[in-house]
Image (spheres, rainbow, N blue to C red):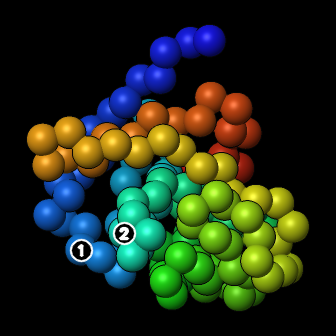
């Protein structure tokens, strides 16, 4: 198994609880979410119609797509409400000396669009 490669994303202080922020890791748009359950990293692209999820809403651990209202669980990427049927890729996240670092899921499919 290949070793995960963590890349710096942003300072933990820049992501208060209840908020989300998009960043780019190795050319991939990733959404960092800080919920009462902890810190989570998922793809920033809806698996239904390729909308930017950072333009949507974070309600607890539920992420709502701004385009058609699909709802995802940021803890595991699971679809909670359609029209999406494919879960979001979830990436590893850690905090090192106050900085959030992300390791992309090597099994995640390529993103359909570029930003």
Q: Which residue: 55% across, 72% down?
A: 53
| The image quarter in which residue 95 lies | top left
Residue positioned most to the top: 1
Quadrant of the image containing the N terminus:
top right
The residue to which callout 2 is attached is 34
In the image, residue 60 above or below residue 24: below
Position of residue 38 in the picture relative to residue 43 (left or right): left
Residue positioned most to the front: 37
Circle 1 — which element? loop
Does the residue at mark 1 contact the one at mark 2 (Cβ under 8 Å)?
Answer: yes
Position of residue 20 in the picture relative to residue 69 (left or right): left
In the image, residue 4 above or below residue 54: above
Q: Which residue: 20% across, 39% down?
A: 96
In the image, residue 107 above or below residue 81: above
The residue to which callout 1 is attached is 16
Nearest the eye: 94 or 7: 94
CA neighbours of label 1 inside 10 A, class few (<14), some (14 to 19), many (20+): few
Position of residue 55 in the picture relative to residue 39 (left or right): right
């Amino acid at each position: 198994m290949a070793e995960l490669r963590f890349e710096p994303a942003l300072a933990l202080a820049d992501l208060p609880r209840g908020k989300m922020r998009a960043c780019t890791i190795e050319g991939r748009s990733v959404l960092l979410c800080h919920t009462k359950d902890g810190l989570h990293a998922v793809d920033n692209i809806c698996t239904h119609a390729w909308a930017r999820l950072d333009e949507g809403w974070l309600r607890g651990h539920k992420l709502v797509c701004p385009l058609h209202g699909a709802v995802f669980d940021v803890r595991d990427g699971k679809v909670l409400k359609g029209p999406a049927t494919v879960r979001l890729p979830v990436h590893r996240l850690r905090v090192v000396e106050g900085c959030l670092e992300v390791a992309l899921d090597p099994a995640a499919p390529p993103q359909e669009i570029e930003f």
